[in-house]
Image: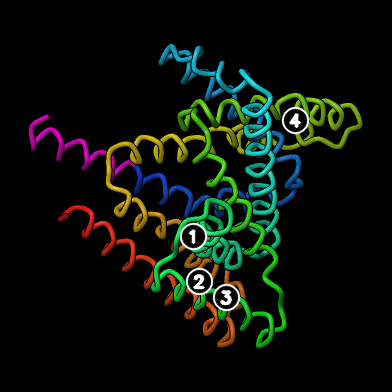
Amino acid sequence: MSLEPQASEQLRGGLAAGAGFLFWGIVPIYWKQMQSVPAHELITHRITWSLVLLLGVLAWRKDFHKLRPAFASWRAFGLNLLSSVLLSVNWLVYVWAVNNGHIIESSLGYFLTPLGNVALGFLFLHERLRILQWTAIGFAALGVLLLLVGVGHVPWIALTLAATWSSYGILKKKSALGSVTGLTVETLMLLPFALAALLWWNHTGEGALGRVDAWMHVLVLSVGVITAVPLLLFAYGAQRIRLATLGLLQYLAPTVQFLIGVYWFREPFDSGRLAAFSLIWCGLILYSADSFWSQRKRLFR
């Protein structure tokens, strides 16, 4: 491949990944419009309608045969089922947090995720950590401790989001499936539970469909597209840009979420929280610098 087409591919990949992360960043505004619908019901709609979109993508690409490895063994089935549960818990906590006035803390969870990936890689994949990585984790731990002691608040939302998303990433590293195929399998495994819940809520009169106004119907039925599109943009971009670039772009989503929480929805953010966040941001700067230097060393060997 000549340099010009390769640069063009990287540019498109960077724009796609950036758009996906920006989309994730502004999506709290969308979820806030549906505060009257319980978070668990929104997640069942997300599972149902995102599967429709994903199956359409697989049909367009003629990739249905790529679903088979997920069901080829009990181990593959179990790993994908665990991935689907972790992803659903992550989304459930996230949507609940956004709609209950915790956008800032949810952004903290995704700020912590890269450092959580490093920690889990050390614990479960036996990856060796460099000094700057240990230092970055230390800064993050101090930030969480400051929230606990100084603010008197256990950041359970942030810790749950970081733990589930990092664990999901670890499982995805073990998966032989592509990103779109893997997401389709995970969604397909949860479909029976989602459909059963939606049918039951409709039967008991607790569900939103048929009982809310037209605009709310549009919002609820759009959750599949709203959640699947940024994942597809991310998958497209991740295949075309360097890991270091992707690592820097990932901070776009929690940064935008944080700014929306502070300046749009006016969530409380006092000096104690600022000090805690500052420690965690220092950890992220060290982590990013270490990743950048490490990649440069590999390139110039």
Where is mark 2, residue-wise?
137
Identify the amino acid type marked 2. Ile
Can you give x and y, in whole percent of width and height, for residue 245 in the image? 29, 53
Q: Report the disc number at residue 118.
A: 1
* Residue that mark 4 sits on: 194
Q: Is residue 15 visible?
A: yes
Residue at the image point whose x is 64% and y is 47% from the top: 91
Q: Please name the amino acid that badge 3 sits on.
A: Ala
Pointers 2 and 1 in contact (CB under 8 A)?
Answer: yes
Amino acid type at image mark 1: Val
Mark whose residue sits in front, 2 or 4: 2
Query: Of the residues under marks 4 and 3, which one precedes in the sequence?
Result: 3
- Is 134 situated left or right of 166 in this image? left
Q: Foreground mark, 1 or 4? A: 1
Q: Which span of residues is magenta-colored? A: 1-16
- Circle 4 SS class: helix
Classify 152 as above or below 176: below
Q: Nearer the viewer, residue 261 or 2?
A: 2
Q: Main secondary structure of the magenta part?
A: helix
Which circle's residue, 2 or 1, is located before the other in the chain?
1
**Residue at the spot of label 3:** 141
State if disc 1 and disc 3 touch (CB < 8 Å).
no
At x 48%, y 49%, the residue is 24
Point out the frontmost of discs 4 and 3: 3
